[in-house]
Amino acid sequence: MSFDIKVHILDHAHTIIDNLKSYKNNNGLIHFNSSVDSAYFINQGYDTQEKIDNIMTTILKNITKIKLSVEEKNGNYINKQGVKRQKYRIREIKFDKLLSVYHNRHFDASKSVNPHFHFLFNKKDRVGKGYIYLREALQIEANKFGIKFNFMEDKQENGLNQQEAKMIKRLSWHLHQGDRDKLEKYFKNSNLIQKHIETLIKHYQYTHNLSFFIKTISILQQRLQELDIDYFYKDTNVKENLFFFLTSSQKEKIIKLQNNQNIKLDLSKVLDREILKYTYGFSSEVMNILVDKFKLPTINKENIEVIDNQK
């Protein structure tokens, strides 16, 4: 059975606004999604799931009503001096024909996820090249609440070439879908798994994104356990043992947390956002693992100072 993105995003939705016009084939629809790290909400005082849900639902409703006036190229003309010039026209852009969906949980309820939107629309709908108009509408709404959608983050080098970057994305999605037949075939190719893990390590060495690294290795371990398959990366059986690495900066933060010391959190850093979320009672697989590994005590909110680098 082929994967149906519409069925997938409706399955575990918190809020649905279905203005999608008639269509014959779900596979012909265009899909765009975007998330907000919960840490940005917490930093703005929206420190409960209910408060976050209210803001995200409000944004989703506002997107369906927003109208953008954009200037688009519209051919050429010859001016009085005989010089060719670009013609422009003003176009009104609306987002009232989309299937708009808000999620506050992962399709696997055991995993944490940042609040996020999915949009499905007909390829003829004008959302701009690279979804630029839809992104602009989302950014307008985000600025009202002092938050950032993921595309508003500073672009970070990942140390990967284009092929490696695509490989990492496919690996993560492949593992999350959990197709048993595909996974069994995948795990028979030990050389491919090793290549994927080494590419994941290379990604982490550049980005220091401990959250993505641990989540990916964790889901890899989960699939190995489900299929009862041993896989050794160097001397570690990934089915039995979760491995990860810490930078010197991350180790320093762990030591401060162990000693109940004051700690400054920079929201431009992934681990710092995970610490903030965990402190306020939000689920974080990464922090659960770190707390267990390093025997971290309860984190007091009074010991946390957030460095706000939002522009």
Image: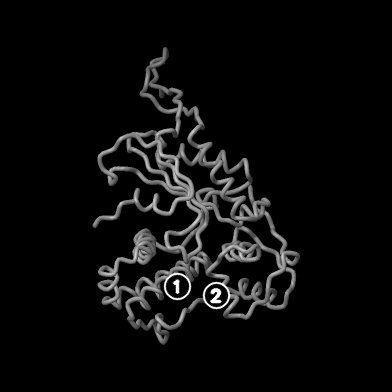
Q: Nearer the viewer, residue 297 or 266?
A: 297
Q: In the rendering, which numbered label is found on residue 218?
A: 1
Residue 97: quarter of image? top left
Residue 258 in picture, x, y percent from top left: 68, 78
Q: Residue at x 42, y 69 (%)?
A: 200
Amino acid type of the residue tagged 1 in the rendering: Ser
Q: Nearer the viewer, residue 116 or 245?
A: 116
Outermost residue toward the top?
80
Q: Residue at x 43, y 33 (%)?
A: 96
Q: Is residue 2 left or right of residue 310?
A: left
Picture quarter with the N terminus: bottom left
Residue 267 in picture, x, y percent from top left: 62, 58
Relative height, residue 105 to residue 296 (above, below)? above
The reply to whether discs 2 and 1 touch (Cβ–Cβ < 8 Å) is yes
Q: In the rendering, which numbered label is found on residue 289?
A: 2
Q: Residue at x 47, y 79 (%)?
A: 242
Q: Is residue 184 left or right of residue 17?
A: left
Outermost residue toward the bottom?
235
Q: Residues within 10 Å of mark 2 (few under 14, many from 20)?
A: few
* Helix, strand or loop status at disc 1: helix
Amino acid type of the residue tagged 2 in the rendering: Ile
Residue 253: quarter of image? bottom right
Q: How many discs mark residues in the rendered view? A: 2
Residue 254 in picture, x, y percent from top left: 64, 75
